[in-house]
Amino acid sequence: MINIRNGTLFVKENDFLTFSQIFYILFGYGCIDVLRVILRMAREFKNFIDGRWRDAVGGKRFENRNPANWDELIGTFPDSRAEDIDLAVKSAAAAYESWRLTPAPRRGEIIRRAGDLLVQYKEEIAREMTREMGKVLLETRGDVQEGIDTAYYAATEGRRLFGFTAPSELPNKFNMSIRLPIGVAGVITPWNFPMAIPTWKIFPALVCGNTVVFKPAEDTPATAVRLVEILLEAGLPDKVIQLVNGNGPSAGMPLVEHPGVKLISFTGSTQVGKLISATASKDLKRVSLELGGKNAQIVMPDADLDLALEGVLWGAFGTAGQRCTATSRLILHEAIHDKFLAMLIKRVEKIRLGNGLEPTAEVGPVINQKQLDKVLSYIGVGKDEGAKLETGGERYTDGACRNGFFIRPTIFSQVDPEMRIAKEEIFGPVLAVIKVGSLDAAIRVLNNTKYGLSSSLYTRDVNAAFKAIRDLEAGITYINGPTIGAEAHMPFGGVKETGNGHREGGWPVYEFFTEIKTVFVDYSGKLQRAQIDNQ
Ligand code: UN1
């Protein structure tokens, strides 16, 4: 089987090309592209605007490289500006007129087919994603799986999109509320879940009848191209989705500012989220923000310590700590503090770093030089603040890792809850361990941050569990599980400066992407004046 998508020739392994296929490739597709594949030259990716793959109007491009080996160029992408956004938004606004009238169950069917295609291409996408952003193959497969789960869940919502009916206070009158789409949605996504997070936003937006302009993170544009290709292959009308690559200030902000965009869904830093919120509120746009986290796991003396250990290892060092939900603080009861810390250090020192495509690698690199510098600088802050560096604390450059952005899994103990490393988001493989004397103290420490995304408590005491469920200031609480592990049909999001009250995942997203209309049908044949007649 051969398959040509957006400038690249894919030939399935063990397939032989027939003469007619070779003829088709050379003359039907383009000799230059074929030569590029043969010579392994960097692939030139494009935007998808107004129904076709094209370069940025200004002709500029940016590079995308493998964080596990910076010498490896994955491709170049259009460096888009306001004029590209403008073309995309206008085209998406025109497409909205027919898409909004397509029955929602039909829209859901297209998303279900996109889910089927994600199943079909899962391995290929996971491998490309590992090359593009570094996390290990097991995790990139999980990232695609999250997209699949989201697709199948979204397809079912196409058959619900509930409003409600209620009795009228007047005779011969019918009351109901219905859901309507809103218009063009601007979707701006991060690099740490390059498939899952865009699908969380785009699939519900489309099922609800909106059209989408998608601006993915500049560190993971290749996965975004795959997602758009899949949506088109699934049968999505071509102007209903528009893909505009580029960076935040030059492509993301024009999308937020564009008067044709009615909704913005953004996942990223709290700092950028505040900027987006301030900008979008000038035009009263609806904005969903999923921002930073400083998540913690509490371990009580009665917990299953082996289970709690597995939890913190996965929560803190999976994805090299680059999850909004990563465990970046470990709050240990003093009765088990020393024992648990010793168990943890022993295991952390055995974690194998490496290129995520290597079967032996357990943790990959951080995403880029800037992130490497930021994490290393926080390690410096921790030392300066007087925390005790137990293990890690430096860049790892052994063997094949020498050209990548690897950081040894790092643990600080004797962390005071007021230290910066206990309160600020680091987004890397760094864990701050804090000792407490009671559950109340643990809850106070966990809440002692401006963020409120995920939280976890390991205990066998049901009373302690329910107290924590009530008192932990977080959008997500896990009992006897790590701080990570969202499910597609469950609300995902946080309190305080983690967001602005909206949720991703589950039904609340469908509320975000629809407008409620309240409808009254008066079949009495006479003027009825509600409160005036009811006095
Ligand atoms: C994020 O970190 O931005 O629950 C999303 C989890 C993942 C999603 C995280 N399934 O950690």
Image (cartoon, rainbow, N blue to C red):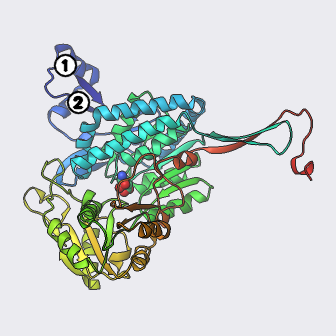
- Secondary structure state at the residue bearing disc 1: helix
Q: Residue at x 28, y 61 (%)?
A: 311
Q: Residue at x 33, y 83 (%)?
A: 416
Answer few, some or many: residues within 10 Å of disc 2's Cα (few below 14, many 20 plus, some between 14 and 19): few
Quadrant assignment, res 147? top left
**Could you tell me if residue 136 is visible in this image?**
yes
Q: Nearer the viewer, residue 130 or 474?
A: 474
- Residue lying at the far left in this picture: please name it: 399
The amino acid at mark 2 is Phe
Residue type at mark 1: give it: Ile
| Quarter that holds the N terminus | top left
Horizontally, residue 67 falls left or right of residue 201, namely: left
Residue 164 in picture, x, y percent from top left: 67, 41
Q: Residue at x 23, y 45 (%)?
A: 74
In this rendered view, identify the residue nearer to me: 246 or 198.
Answer: 198
Q: Quadrant of ligand 1?
A: bottom left
Label 2 element class: strand
Tell me where residue 354 sits by quadrant: bottom left
- In this rendering, the answer to whether 333 lies above or below 13 is below
Give the image location of residue 81, x and y in percent: 44, 49
Q: Is residue 197 above or below residue 24?
A: below
Give the residue number, with chain letter if any, for mark 2.
Answer: 10
**Which mark's residue is nearer the viewer, 1 or 2?**
2
**Horizontal side, residue 14 vs residue 148: left or right:** left
The residue positioned 38% from the left and 75% from the top of the image is: 423
- First in sequence, mark 1 or 2: give its number: 2
Q: Please provide percent x and percent y for residue 255.
A: 50, 50
* Cα distance between the residues tagged 1 and 2: 13 Å
- The residue beneath circle 1 is 22
For label 1, the crowd category at 10 Å Cα-Cα, with few meaning under 14, some 14 to 19 and many 20 or more, is: few
